[in-house]
Amino acid sequence: MRVHISRCVVELIQRAADEAAPHEACGLLFGGDRTVDAARIAANVAENPLIHFEIDPAALFAAIRAERAGGPVLAGYWHSHPSGDATPSATDAAMAAPDGKLWLIVAGGVVTGWRAVANGCHHGRFAPIVLETG
């Protein structure tokens, strides 16, 4: 599956990851099933942000409320792996609901795309997607 992502979104995610290092950065993605045209940075409220991320629930709930009111569609989530690679970890898989949402992971200047699904080929939770920037 291919997902089109704005180059501005990729740059925002990479910059936020660089600025947050050595902590994990995280945020929200907006668009549709096959597009990501906006992203927001959210506070990482994890107990240990050096090795985990947890999107600030207030930011997540605000995005859901806005979507229900006709605002931008919450397409998924993004986070960084400052000391790893850009593939989902077993912890990511344990946190992800099989809801079809997009997950973008940034590490080492690379952004990869994944969809959270039941019985995914990666940790049983994620299917890889191809990101097309433009």
Image: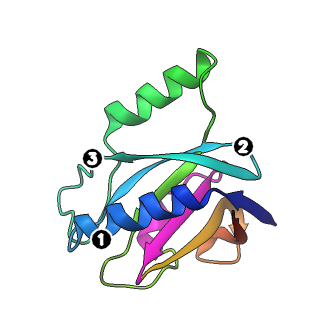
Secondary structure beneath dot 3 equals loop
* Dot placed on the residue nearer the N-terminal end, 1 or 3: 1
Q: Is residue 74 above or below residue 41?
A: above
Indicate the position of residue 57 as horizontal and vertical percent values.
34, 36
The CA span between labels 1 and 2 is: 26 Å
- Between residue 69 and residue 124, name the one nearer to us: 69
User: On the image, numbered disc 3 is attached to which residue?
Assistant: 43
Secondary structure beneath dot 2 equals loop
- Between residue 94 and residue 23, name the one nearer to us: 23
Specify start and end residues of the magenta stretch as a single range: 89-108
Q: Quadrant of the N terminus?
A: bottom right
Q: How is the image coloured?
A: rainbow
Secondary structure beneath dot 1 equals helix
Please say if the residues under marks 2 and 3 sit with CB atoms less than 8 Å apart: no
- The type of residue carrying mark 2 is Gly
Q: Quadrant of residue 23?
A: bottom left
* Dot placed on the residue nearer the N-terminal end, 1 or 2: 1
Q: Nearer the viewer, mark 1 or mark 2?
A: 1
- Specify whether residue 105 is painted magenta: yes
User: On the image, numbered disc 1 is attached to which residue?
Assistant: 18
Mark number, residue 32: 2
- The type of residue carrying mark 1 is Asp
- Between residue 33 and residue 122, name the one nearer to us: 33
Q: Quadrant of residue 51?
A: bottom left
Please say if the residues under marks 1 and 2 sit with CB atoms less than 8 Å apart: no
Q: Image point 23% across, 71% down: which residue? A: 21
